Image (spheres, grey):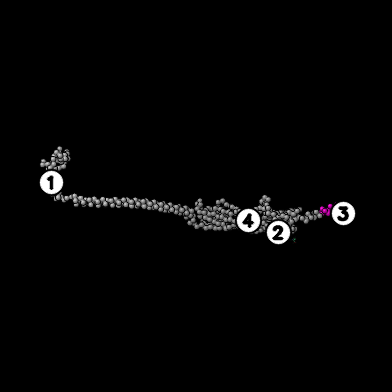
């Protein structure tokens, strides 16, 4: 049988078509979103149909919410870690023992709030490629709300409700005992570094017949809720706010401390003064003693001198009499204030000059 050139060409084309066909595959995964609980490990399913081996292919896992965001690459039978989104590093892996039967599922450990998103599983052979997108929802139910009493505010009582660790973002509502929503301040929402939400909201409540109020944090997507009820004693609406009491107590304390310090200071000063005074007095006392001593000595000397004079130099009146002599005064030489008697023996009196004229 003679084979023509045309037949040959046809055979080659058929062969090429066959090989290309055998290389074709589909990439499949779940059509429903994967719900992951924060902190858990999850599998993002992805596989080839038909179940041919992916060991010689390039497997890429991408996060579509990031530009050029690659979580993982398997190429030339190796795991390529370059150009990986940082916060996925160390948390992603393939089941390498499953690759030979076309299982290219990704394992993601310690799921975070920030992991929520769309992930593309892209598989390329030398002549073909296909991809599939898996959606991941992260669920985290946060803490029981913490309600704190903030004190008197604008004629009512201020209450604060806080709760953390939620994903997706929850709604916070304040309710009275009849389940009626209370109008509250603006809600505050923060995201922590793992992408979980923390919410808080203030409310000012007025006294009611029950004085019971509820803070509810709810997540409509997951149909989850957490709530805390608080009962305020009605005295709380009237009594002095503790803050005021605290301030007053602080002021009183400060005044007491200052007063005490001043008293101690004055007492110290007084003590010093008294000490000085006592020293002065002691000195004066000492001087006086010295003076007294001097005087006593002088007194003694004088007394002894007087005694001496008395005994030796003071003859008694009789002795003087016995030694009496008559004295005659010459009017010429007598003191001009003396008026002499006629016999010149006795002076009548001691007169002033004017009296004698
Ligand atoms: C591949 O799929 C076929 C049916 O489609 C199944 O019989 C076979 O066991 C699978 N092979 C592996 C390795 O899973
Ligand atoms: C792929 O491998 C993982 C881990 O063994 C397994 O849980 C998963 O079911 C596999 N997927 C398919 C499609 O075989």
Label 1 vs 2, first from the N-terminus: 2
Residue at the far top: name it: 357
Q: Nearer the viewer, mark 2 or mark 4?
A: 2
Q: Nearer the viewer, mark 3 or mark 2?
A: 2
Label 3 vs 1, first from the N-terminus: 3
Calculate the distance from the C-alpha at mark 2 to the C-alpha at mark 4.
24 Å
Q: Nearer the viewer, mark 4 or mark 1?
A: 1
Calculate the distance from the C-alpha at mark 3 to the C-alpha at mark 1.
211 Å
Is 26 magenta? The answer is no
Q: Is mark 3 within 8 Å of ligand 1?
A: no
Q: Is residue 87 left or right of residue 278?
A: right
Label placed on residue 255: none
Q: Quadrant of residue 133?
A: bottom right
Q: Helix, strand, or loop for circle 1?
A: loop
Label placed on residue 96: 2
Residue at the spot of label 4: 112
Q: Is residue 58 left or right of residue 327?
A: right
Q: Quarter of the image containing the C terminus?
A: top left
Q: Is residue 311 left or right of residue 194?
A: left
- Classed neighbour count for the residue bearing mark 2: other residues with Cα under 10 Å, few (<14), some (14–19), many (≥20): some
Residue at the spot of label 3: 3
Residue at the far right: name it: 1
* Residue 195 locus on image (x, y percent): 61, 54
Label 4 vs 1, first from the N-terminus: 4
């Amino acid at each position: 049988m003679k084979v023509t050139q045309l037949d040959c060409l046809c055979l080659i084309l058929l062969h090429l078509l066959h090989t290309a066909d055998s290389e074709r595959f589909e990439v499949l995964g779940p059509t429903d979103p994967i719900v992951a609980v924060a902190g858990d490990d999850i599998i993002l399913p992805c596989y080839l149909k038909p179940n041919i081996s992916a060991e010689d292919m390039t497997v890429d896992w991408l996060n579509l919410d990031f530009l050029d965001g690659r979580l993982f690459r398997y190429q030339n039978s190796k795991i390529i870690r370059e150009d990986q989104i940082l916060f996925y590093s160390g948390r992603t892996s393939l089941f390498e023992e499953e690759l030979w039967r076309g299982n290219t599922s990704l394992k993601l450990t310690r799921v975070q709030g920030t992991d929520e998103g769309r992930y593309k599983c892209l598989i390329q052979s030398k002549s073909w490629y296909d991809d599939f997108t898996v959606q991941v929802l992260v669920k985290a139910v946060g803490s029981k709300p913490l309600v704190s009493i903030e004190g008197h505010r604008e004629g009512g009582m201020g209450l604060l409700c806080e709760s953390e660790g939620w994903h997706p973002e929850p709604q916070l509502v304040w309710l009275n005992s009849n389940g009626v929503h209370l109008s509250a301040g603006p809600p505050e929402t923060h995201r922590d570094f793992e992408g979980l939400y923390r919410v808080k909201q203030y409310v000012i409540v007025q006294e009611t017949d029950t004085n019971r109020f509820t803070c509810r944090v709810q997540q409509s997507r997951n149909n989850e809720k957490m709530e805390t009820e608080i009962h305020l004693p009605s005295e709380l609406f009237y009594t002095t706010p503790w803050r005021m009491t605290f301030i007053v107590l602080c002021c009183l304390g400060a005044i007491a401390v200052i007063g005490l310090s001043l008293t101690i200071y004055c007492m110290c000063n007084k003590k010093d003064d008294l000490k000085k005074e006592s020293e002065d007095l002691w000195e004066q006392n000492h001087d006086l003693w010295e003076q007294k001593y001097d005087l006593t000595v002088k007194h003694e000397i004088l007394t002894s001198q007087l005694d001496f004079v008395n005994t030796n130099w003071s003859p008694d009146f009789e002795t003087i009499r016995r030694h009496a002599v008559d004295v005659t005064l010459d009017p010429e030489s007598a003191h001009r204030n003396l008026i002499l008697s006629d016999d010149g023996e006795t002076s009548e009196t001691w007169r002033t000059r004017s009296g004698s004229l």
